[in-house]
Image (tube, grey):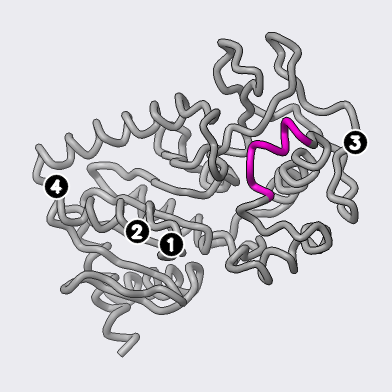
Amino acid sequence: MLDVSIARAAEIVKDAEALLICAGAGMGVDSGLPDFRGPEGFWRAYPAARRLGLRFEELADPRWFFEDPPLAWGFYGHRLNLYRATAPHAGFTILRRLAGAARAGAFVFTSNVDGHFQRAGFAEAQVVECHGSIMHLQCLGGCDRGPWPAAELRVDVDVEALRASPPLPTCPRCGGLARPNILMFGDFLWDASRSAAQEQRMRAWLAEVEASGARAAVICLGSGTAIPTVRFTAERTARRLAGGLVRINPRDPQVPAGQVSLQTGALAGLVAIEEALGARG
């Protein structure tokens, strides 16, 4: 049954003239990034958070930047260091090859904040990071400085205590505390301007694809149902463009009627599709 689905997925991708790649947290698992699914998964990655009795959604809260900045930057500084030290897995390269073969272009829509699509060679103008990026910062004080790259930022973190050592990151304009340009839980202070500009570029591309009548495909990877933004975007776009949807997901593989599901991890699914494409010539 899986072989039949792989063959159907390869056919959808081969025929596509435009490709939308939608990726959630599961995309990073094959790179060795931790799976935060459920409190136990999060606490395995962050034992200090277990000792503090804080779940992911409680620690990923902007209030800590006001109440305990070393803790806030301990958590986000460790994630920044981890994402930088982790290489994107080979599935990203496969996606880049598939995107390069789409004559009407390709776009990435991801909830991941790790910047790995750009690291893997996707152009900045090709990527939408709907929850922001840890590779960019914003001013906590709300001065008129827009988000800026964190390329030069280094955060020293005591991983056992999950606390960052001073000096903590600051805004280059006003000198106040900086925070990652990421949408957190209960976050009314997120500067969404960078992500909004990305989404505007994707909307313009989708309008061009729709107007041209180009055959479209959507590949949705590692996106679960708990926060379904990526899943819904994939399904909505496939309907809009009358294109095929391929969902690659080991836990939540469900797809609308007539679409294709591969119940496997992102890397294994992409390798299988590329091998099937090679067999088809």
The relative height of residue 7 versus residue 148 in the rendered view (above or below) is: below
Q: Which mark is residue 165?
A: 3
Viewer-closest of 56 and 277 = 56
**Amino acid found under the numbered disc labelled 3:** Ser
**Amino acid found under the numbered disc labelled 2:** Arg
The relative height of residue 103 versus residue 148 in the rendered view (above or below) is: below
Spatial separation of the CA atoms under disc 3 and disc 1:
34 Å
- In x, y percent, where is residue 228? 38, 57
Q: Is residue 10 magenta?
A: no
Spatial separation of the CA atoms under disc 4 and disc 2:
22 Å
Residue drawn at x 31%, y 36% is 202
Residue drawn at x 75%, y 46% is 75
Q: Quadrant of residue 14?
A: bottom left
**Amino acid found under the numbered disc labelled 4:** Ala
Q: Quadrant of residue 148?
A: top right
Labels 2 and 1 touching (C-beta < 8 A):
yes
Circle 1 residues within 10 Å: few <14, some 14–19, many ≥20: many
Q: Which residue is mark 2?
A: 231
Q: Which residue is mark 4?
A: 214
Magenta segment boundaries in residue numbering: 59-67
| SS at circle 4 | loop
Spatial separation of the CA atoms under disc 4 and disc 3:
53 Å
Q: Which residue is mark 1?
A: 223
Earlier sequence position, callout 4 versus callout 3: 3
Residue drawn at x 35%, y 43% is 107
Labels 4 and 3 touching (C-beta < 8 A):
no
